């Protein structure tokens, strides 16, 4: 009897979904489209067995292409709510493979607020879905640490830190706090020099300030690295030059508490 009632409820739910949602998620009014996405996300989180399936997820994937920023933004926030838990993210392998290219491309969304949330979404995927993002995908995010919007650059800074610069990723190496910071600075130097993305270290320092500020303010470790002369531990001329620039930028940031010239707050999405 319980099974029959459960089937009856599912049939009713499907009828409502096909009779209402399937038509309204393409409504001419953007607010209605956004509400559809928001509610679909609620159903998926509340009733995973019934709704967290590829048959329902595809509607979110399709709507990532919506012309209105508030609708795209709602889709991204729904996906954040799903990818932030490993158990729900594990049910989304097919969705990830099918729509990942679109999600990565939205890092360059014309609306800054949408792009910020997309980078946060990719960071959640990085943490909760093993091997979801390829190195090529990540290379699409790294340059964003140099954009003029501080909110977007900081989101990309956290992504960069989690992916490349977190010393705790280096399993079994230098467990002490000082040792971790040495590793951090070496990784940071390698990223800046090898990527050849930008000349201004101050922008990179500012992007990492919110997630790695304490490490960047470890001026004692920076000084130690600069003074080392041994062939094994010492830095090359180019590395020393960049590390001095990092030191100077972090001192200015700590003293003034302001982002570098040319970087400001994000523009708000209209209608939100």
Image (cartoon, helix red, strand yellow):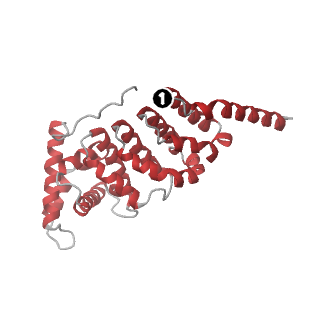
Residue 56 percent coordinates (x, y): 62, 42
Q: Residue at x 68, y 40 (%)?
A: 50
Closer to the camera in the image, 219 or 239:
239
Q: Is residue 12 left or right of residue 272?
A: right
Residue 109 percent coordinates (x, y): 37, 43
Q: Is residue 214 left or right of residue 41?
A: left
Closer to the camera in the image, 178 or 35:
35
Image quadrant holding the C terminus, namely top left
Labels in figure, total: 1
Task: Assign a secondary structure to mark 1.
Answer: helix
Q: Is residue 219 left or right of residue 46?
A: left
Closer to the camera in the image, 190 or 105:
105
In this rendering, the answer to whether 62 lies above or below 197 is above
Image quadrant holding the N terminus, namely top right
Q: Residue at x 18, y 48 (%)?
A: 202
Residue labelled with disc 1: 30
Looking at the rendering, which quadrant does residue 234 occupy? bottom left
> Which residue, as the protein is rendered here, is positioned at the far bottom?
231
In this rendering, the answer to whether 189 lies above or below 271 is below
Q: Is residue 99 visible?
A: yes
Closer to the camera in the image, 66 or 101:
66
């Amino acid at each position: 009897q319980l099974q029959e009632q459960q089937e009856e409820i599912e049939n009713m739910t499907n009828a409502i979904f096909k009779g209402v949602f399937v038509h309204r998620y393409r409504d001419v009014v953007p607010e209605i489209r956004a509400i559809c996405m928001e509610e679909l996300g609620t159903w998926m989180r509340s009733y995973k067995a019934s709704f967290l399936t590829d048959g329902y997820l595809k509607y979110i994937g399709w709507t990532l292409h919506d012309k209105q920023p508030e609708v795209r933004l709602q889709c991204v926030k729904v996906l954040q709510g799903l990818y932030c838990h490993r158990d729900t993210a594990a049910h989304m392998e097919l969705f990830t493979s099918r729509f990942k290219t679109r999600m990565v491309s939205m890092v360059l969304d014309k609306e800054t607020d949408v792009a910020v949330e997309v980078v946060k979404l990719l960071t959640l995927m990085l943490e909760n879905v093993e091997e979801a993002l390829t190195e090529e995908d990540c290379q699409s995010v790294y340059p964003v640490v140099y954009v003029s919007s501080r909110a977007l650059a900081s989101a990309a800074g956290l992504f960069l830190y989690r992916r490349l610069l977190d010393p705790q990723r280096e399993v079994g190496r230098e467990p002490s706090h000082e040792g971790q910071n040495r590793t951090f600075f070496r990784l940071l130097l390698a990223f800046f020099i090898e990527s050849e993305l930008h000349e201004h270290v101050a922008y990179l320092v500012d992007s990492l300030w919110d997630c790695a500020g304490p490490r960047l303010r470890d001026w004692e470790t920076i000084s130690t690295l600069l003074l080392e002369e041994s062939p094994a531990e010492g830095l090359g001329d180019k590395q020393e030059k960049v590390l001095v620039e990092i030191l100077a930028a972090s001192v200015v940031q700590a003293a003034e508490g302001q982002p570098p010239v040319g970087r400001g707050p994000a523009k708000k999405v209209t209608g939100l």
